[in-house]
Amino acid sequence: MNTPRVLITGGAGFLGSHLCERFLAEGYEVTCMDNLITGAVHNIEHLFSDPRFHFEHRDVTEYIHVVGKLDAILHFASPASPIDYLELPIQTLKVGSLGTHKVLGLARAKGARFLLASTSECYGDPLVHPQSEDYWGNVNPVGPRGVYDEAKRFAEAMTMAYHRFHGVETRIVRIFNTYGPRMRLEDGRALPAFMSQALRGEELTVFGDGSQTRSFCFVDDLVEGIWRLLNSDEVQPTNIGNPAEMTILEFARKVVEITGAGSEISFRELPMDDPKVRQPDITKARRILGWEPEIALDEGLRRTLADFRTRVSATAEEPV
Ligand code: UDP
């Protein structure tokens, strides 16, 4: 039997852990590699009983080696929330640059297909709306988000160089805001912040006047899009996200409604370079992958709520 093998870097993170599950379900043997800076073993604990699942506690900016064949590598290692990459600026730059180089080198050595987790942050604070893949972006390289945006833009350039120069089969997904179970409570992103605040009966902290927009995709939809992209022959970057755009204030109100909380909304200072609008143009994903999101926001938030309830009540019971 020739079981396909995949390496997922950042596999113990929010998106990585959902990808590990999906590839096991598709019949793969999965090696999950993570240095656990922002990932966590509890995200993958339920997978250890599967003999086809392996975990390696490793930093992909160092030399990496995997024994045996690899059919595919998904490079998802990176801090990915604004708070995380503000706290870990050098690691963020290193994993996007040195880490991507190492992982591409491994893909080349193994003849594996390589998929890069890129980001809508490549478009920066966009001057084109919605964002399609041919927009080159409006990024401040020296602002607080520059460490993430530029690392991912470098990673895309490096990926294309390995494709063009070394003939590695590469794929690039530009991921827009995604939410779902296992997002870290304390990662500072809108959904975990709002949902845990609502469940604790605290005020929801909306930054600025809340008129900035985002478009939120449920994690299962994203994983389906990534699965299809990996199995396609599309080398150029492809947006995967949910085009249902809303203001952050509307989003906060929706979280209050779904949680049934009585929370008020309070307004805080808008972080520097916070993009004013963001909405994926998914014309290309529809055309080449036959993909579009299927899970509406209400449904996705309900599916996310159960997981947050358990974790928020567990933290409430911890002794102070
Ligand atoms: N945001 C907010 N309150 C919070 C956390 C985030 O109003 O407690 C806003 C943030 O300023 C941004 C949007 O929600 O405009 C989405 O933020 P997130 O960190 O989830 O992702 P981003 O799209 O900024 O990378």
Image (spheres, rainbow, N blue to C red):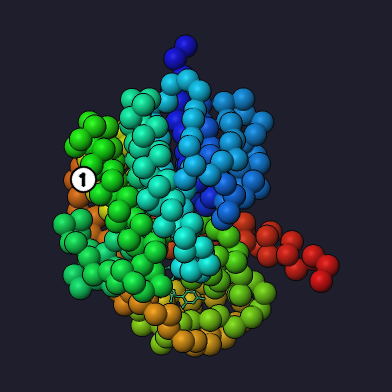
In this figure, which residue is indicated by the disc labeled 1? Answer: 236
178 displayed left or right of 314: left
Mark 1 residue crowding within 10 angstroms, few (<14) / some (14–19) / many (20+): few
In the image as oriented, which residue stretches furthest toward the left? Answer: 134
How many discs mark residues in the rendered view? 1
Q: In the image, is residue 91 above or below residue 25?
A: below
Q: Residue at the spot x=41%, y=72% of the render?
A: 144
Indicate the position of residue 26 as horizontal and vertical percent values. Answer: 45, 30
Q: Secondary structure at mark 1?
A: loop
Quarter assignment of residue 274: bottom left
Indicate the position of residue 213 as horizontal and vertical percent values. Answer: 34, 74
**Nearest to the observer: residue 199 or residue 122:** 122
Indicate the quadrant containing the C terminus: top left, top right, bottom left or bottom right: bottom right
In the image as oriented, which residue stretches furthest toward the top? Answer: 1
Would the CB of label 1 be found within 8 Å of ligand 1?
no
Q: Is residue 124 visible?
A: yes
Q: Residue at the spot x=53%, y=50% of the render?
A: 13
141 displayed left or right of 272: left
In the image as oriented, which residue stretches furthest toward the right? Answer: 319
**Nearest to the observer: residue 245 or residue 175:** 175
Q: Residue at the spot x=34%, y=72% of the render?
A: 142
Q: In the image, is residue 238 above or below residue 148?
A: above
Q: Name the quadrant where ligand 1 sits.
A: bottom left
**Mark 1 residue type:** Gln
Q: Is residue 244 visible?
A: no
169 displayed left or right of 46: left
Indicate the position of residue 278 as horizontal and vertical percent values. Answer: 30, 69
Indicate the position of residue 156 as horizontal and vertical percent values. Answer: 28, 49
Quarter assignment of residue 127: bottom left
Q: Residue at the spot x=64%, y=71% of the render?
A: 199
**Nearest to the observer: residue 127 or residue 164:** 164
